[in-house]
Amino acid sequence: MISLVRSFLSAICALALLFSVGINPLHAATTEIKLGTDSGMLAFEPSNLTISAGDSVKFVNNKLAPHNAVFDGHEELSHTDLAFAPGESWTETFSTAGTYVFYCEPHRGAGMEGKIIVQ
């Protein structure tokens, strides 16, 4: 009987520890942003996105390469290397709430800019 109680208490302690560490991968999401629209426009698709803290954004090279994504004031999120190949991608995780403005260096003059709002 005592060993059964100990096993039960050990299991409860293990679950409590797991939840207190904050590991919760079930709620994190990954959203895709295309670099160049399907119709061939020099734009991010979507150009405005709202996500939750802890979510990720996968940037995928789509049309009219080369493209990159540079974030104003956030070098740690910027991907300055140019993507040339269709389907080339990278993923960034946004852990802090805020508004993140980004642009494609080669096509900024053409208006290729976007915004990610992290709640």
Image (cartoon, rainbow, N blue to C red):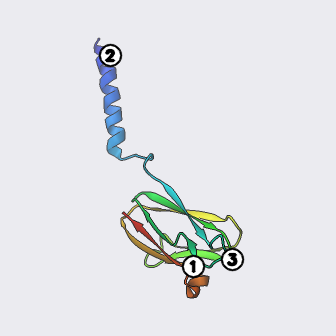
Looking at the image, residue 20 sits to the left or right of residue 81; the answer is: left
Residue at point 45%, 52% (across, down) = 28
- Note whether 115 is above or below 15 in the view shown: below
Q: Is there CB contact under 8 Å for labels 3 and 1?
A: no
Q: Position of residue 11 (x, y in %)?
A: 35, 27
Residue at point 28%, 14% (across, down) = 2
| Element carrying mark 2 | helix
Q: Earlier in the sequence, mark 3 or mark 1?
A: 3
Q: Give the residue furthest to the right.
A: 85
Q: Which residue is mark 1?
A: 104
Q: Residues within 10 Å of mark 3 (few under 14, many from 20)?
A: some
- Note whether 17 is above or below 116 in the view shown: above
Mark 1 residue type = Cys
Residue 80 shows in this picture? no
Pair 2/3: label in front: 3
Quarter of the figure with the C terminus: bottom left
Which mark identifies residue 59? Answer: none
Q: Nearer the viewer, residue 6 or 105?
A: 105
Q: Position of residue 18 (x, y in %)?
A: 37, 39
Pair 1/2: label in front: 1
Q: Which residue is mark 2?
A: 4
Q: Position of residue 34 (x, y in %)?
A: 60, 68
Q: Residues within 10 Å of mark 2 (few under 14, many from 20)?
A: few
Q: Give the residue furthest to the bottom.
A: 109
Q: Which residue is mark 3?
A: 64
Q: CA distance from mark 2 to mark 3?
A: 65 Å
